[in-house]
Amino acid sequence: MAEDRNGVRGPELPPRHVGLKQLAEHLGLSVATVSRVLNRSAAANRISTRTQDLVWAAAQAMHYEPNHLARALRRKKTYTMGVMVPEISEGYAASVLSGIEGALLQSGYFYFVVSHHHRADLLREYPRMLLSRGVEGLIAIDTPLEQHLPIPVVAVSGHQRMENVTNLELDHTAAVRMALTHLHGLGHRRIAFIKGQAFSSDTHDRWSAIEQIAQELGVAIDPRLCVQLEGTEAGSDSGYRAAVRLLEWRVPFTAIFAFNDHSAIGAIACLKEHGLEIPRDVSVVGFDDIPSAQTNHPSLTTVRQPLRSMGETAANALLRYIEPPEPPYPEQPHPEPPQKAHKEMPETLIVKPDFVIRNSTAPASDKV
Amino acid sequence: MAEDRNGVRGPELPPRHVGLKQLAEHLGLSVATVSRVLNRSAAANRISTRTQDLVWAAAQAMHYEPNHLARALRRKKTYTMGVMVPEISEGYAASVLSGIEGALLQSGYFYFVVSHHHRADLLREYPRMLLSRGVEGLIAIDTPLEQHLPIPVVAVSGHQRMENVTNLELDHTAAVRMALTHLHGLGHRRIAFIKGQAFSSDTHDRWSAIEQIAQELGVAIDPRLCVQLEGTEAGSDSGYRAAVRLLEWRVPFTAIFAFNDHSAIGAIACLKEHGLEIPRDVSVVGFDDIPSAQTNHPSLTTVRQPLRSMGETAANALLRYIEPPEPPYPEQPHPEPPQKAHKEMPETLIVKPDFVIRNSTAPASDKV
DNA sequence: ACCATTTTTGTAAACGGTTGCGCAGCCGTG
DNA sequence: CACGGCTGCGCAACCGTTTACAAAAATGGT
């Protein structure tokens, strides 16, 4: 790796990698000067314009790239965030990630992604490893936080109130109101519910909202029409199995409100196999609006979580909290006092869902 | 951020963050000794067992976590990789990512993900930024490489032969052979093709394979039955539009071989709207086997790319190339010579596809 | 021509670890 | 008792940058 520092094979032409040292040497200047110029440091006004130009030119010519590690070590600023997700492949996390990525890279931040698979040891270890690597903030997606962390955290779909963490939550009440109002308006009164797995952080809040809104609308919640998802994988199978259990009770219902689109799709598959037609016999409402929601047959009426923009929001919230005053250039001769170090972290950020009506819901029938 | 190094508010109890320095001080030892013990460095045999125990105990007690940046700077080893993808959300990349993640983290590596969106400037900048951050290797997913990089690269679905890069390719010939043999066996002779976008690195190779296999099977390729995907977004819309163009030609066909599942799903939606039934009137074969392939209606017969395992393979190939001899512990008193620094990088790694037959294909009809 | 400034640049100490080398003791031996 | 070798550890340089401080050079005033 470091075998030919002085070019073993060729006549010593371009150094393996130029550092400030090489640059300075080549220019006949000190590293300090070069560094100051390249950083547009405050003290750079005091350096002659001629020298500055020379430095820039040389930097270009020699393809100087600062060593981020050294810089981060010295400045105590890594421009790096950590992101924890249950797993990557699963659509939900990927969409949020994509939003995070957009916002972070735009601000010059990179990020590490780690996926615990709800494994307790990883949930404990990863935050420490990330800290050790100097992340300045953490975004936890659908991930339970254990210890208090010495850096700001934004928890997407998180619910625990802790110091230093901002929870970014969907407005479940609004979401559920839209869904149930829709069903209620179509005449549905006997509604079955597929609850989320216990480990999913949204499960509890969503259910509370359901209880509240159901009461508002005067819709009874029949315990025999409630099933809970089982298993830890993300596919639609668990929704299928949930529907099987629902049918076994033989309690009639005209609609299902599923915990997410995956389970809705699974449930629909199951109902169809049992000779029921969707939405004629049973209406189904999903949640999330994953891509397959619109390609499914029938296409899914569902509550849309604006996942991408939730990711952006999370990242931006974190950035706001971390970033020192000046964005890229501190040019402006601000006469104001240097501004508070960083904004306060709000305890909760609420994001509004959308409701998209497709073909899996229709007026209630009495078939089932 | 560093305001209360000595605990402004409380009586100086636990230092903000313990470093080797604090540890050593507390133990009455030199940082050198502590470092050697904690690293199980070769020179640690020479340190008394008693001291070692003390060091470990103190490290535990004081929650010492080494600063990864400092360590990386000195050792010139960052345990970090870079991953470039077109975009994250799109299923393909996400699945591969998940495989990469598994393999890398298992080996103690973290990774940065960046997504160029086929933007030329990003394709140029990102590799440099990643280098600057000290990544030891790069995985490029469906991403054209421009410059030669001074680190090993594995290109998933990459095709350019360059120094330092290993291409991880699907065996397109095998894939196409399975798909076309299947259709041919069902009696299909007039087969339409949806080609990939020009920027997708698989497009060209896959098409070559199609030409080859079609000839082998004696299936004619009618230019009027070939359309190319347009647009840069990943959804199924472009497949829909492709099917529209296909129908406009009014040249009869009994099957479609789509470039990927997304476009297959879009095409199916379009055909259905035009009163065609799948697979009775037209059979459709997809490619990739994304999750919606099995929940789609009808479920998709498709070529499966083992995306997750391709990610794993890519990561492991990179690791094999980078890792110095010893995995975690160099315990064994190897008498052999210290082994070649690293394995040669093969030019290409081929991965075999699977073929999964579902409900979007059936014997040829003459309806269209 | 000389001193007080004001430019312009250099010196060196960090940042938090790793590591080559060497210095004390202690032991056994001739 | 002098000497060589081992054991157990510390000194100090180094990784590539940033930055407080100071020095050198240039400028201006008298």
Image (cartoon, coloured by chain):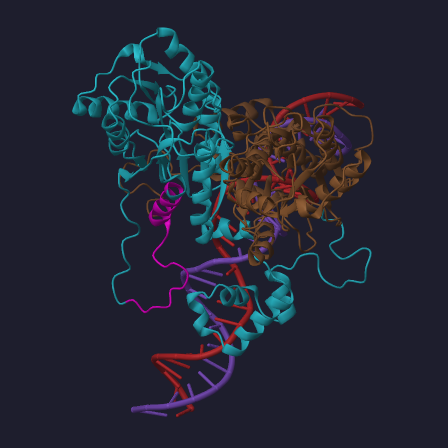
Chain colours: A brown, B cyan, C purple, D red
Quadrant for residue B284, please give it: top left
Magenta span contains residue A264: no
**In-image side of A98 versus A331 (left or right):** left
Task: Give the farthest residue toward the top.
Answer: B249
The vertical placement of B112 against B341, above or below, is above
Frontmost residue, B330 versus A56 = B330
Q: Does residue B25 appear in the picture of this structure? A: yes
Q: Picture coordinates of residue B127 (x, y %)?
A: 45, 32
Q: Position of residue B152 (x, y in %)?
A: 36, 40
Is A357 in front, or is C28? A357
Relative image position of residue A208 (x, y in whole percent): 75, 44
Q: Tell me: B156 left or right of A197.
A: left
- The image shows a total of numbered marks equal to 0
Q: Nearer the viewer, residue D22 or A91?
A: A91
What residue range appears in magenta? B310-334
- Report the front residue among B21 and A268: A268
Asked whether B317 falls inside the magenta stretch, the response is yes
The quarter in which the C terminus of chain A is drawn is: top right
Do we see residue A64 in this rendering?
no
Check the image and report above or below for D3 versus B15.
below
Q: Quadrant of residue B261?
A: top left
Q: Position of residue B303 (x, y in %)?
A: 34, 33
